[in-house]
Amino acid sequence: MSKLRNSKGEVVMECHSCELLAINGVGCHESGCPDAWKDQVRSCKWCGQEFKPLLPGMNCCSEDCDEAYNT
């Protein structure tokens, strides 16, 4: 497991699938990492609220928004 630490030594990111690196102080996964989606912040397609997805293809922040968006 790769861990990215800040200047205080605190772990700010972890990944089981790639070697993390920092570019201009921003934590990044390697290109093609299958787990990179876990650190994305997305906007809900229905209500616009920002959320972190629980699944790779998740487009809505909740089941209610997903149901409303897909009907």
Image (cartoon, grey):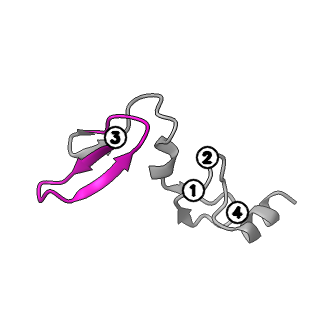
For mark 3, what is the residue? 28
* Mark 4: few/some/many CA within 10 Å (<14, 14-19, 20+): some
For mark 1, what is the residue? 53
Q: From which residue to which does the magenta span run?
A: 2-21
Badge nearest the viewer, 4 or 2: 2
Identity of the residue drawn at 80% across and 66% down: 68
Residue 46, numbered circle: 4
Does dot 3 land on a helix, a strand or a loop?
A: strand
Badge nearest the viewer, 4 or 1: 1
**Residue furthest out toward the right:** 71
Which circle's residue, 4 or 2, is located before the other in the chain?
4
Q: Could you give the CA–CA distance between mark 2 and mark 3, rounded to whole angstroms?
A: 17 Å
**Do the residues bearing badges 4 and 2 touch, measured as CB atoms within 8 Å?**
no
Q: Is residue 49 magenta?
A: no
Which circle's residue, 4 or 1, is located before the other in the chain?
4
Q: Amino acid at mark 3?
A: Cys
Q: Could you give the CA–CA distance between mark 3 and mark 1, rounded to whole angstroms?
A: 17 Å
**Do the residues bearing badges 2 and 1 touch, measured as CB atoms within 8 Å?**
yes
Q: Quadrant of the C terminus?
A: bottom right
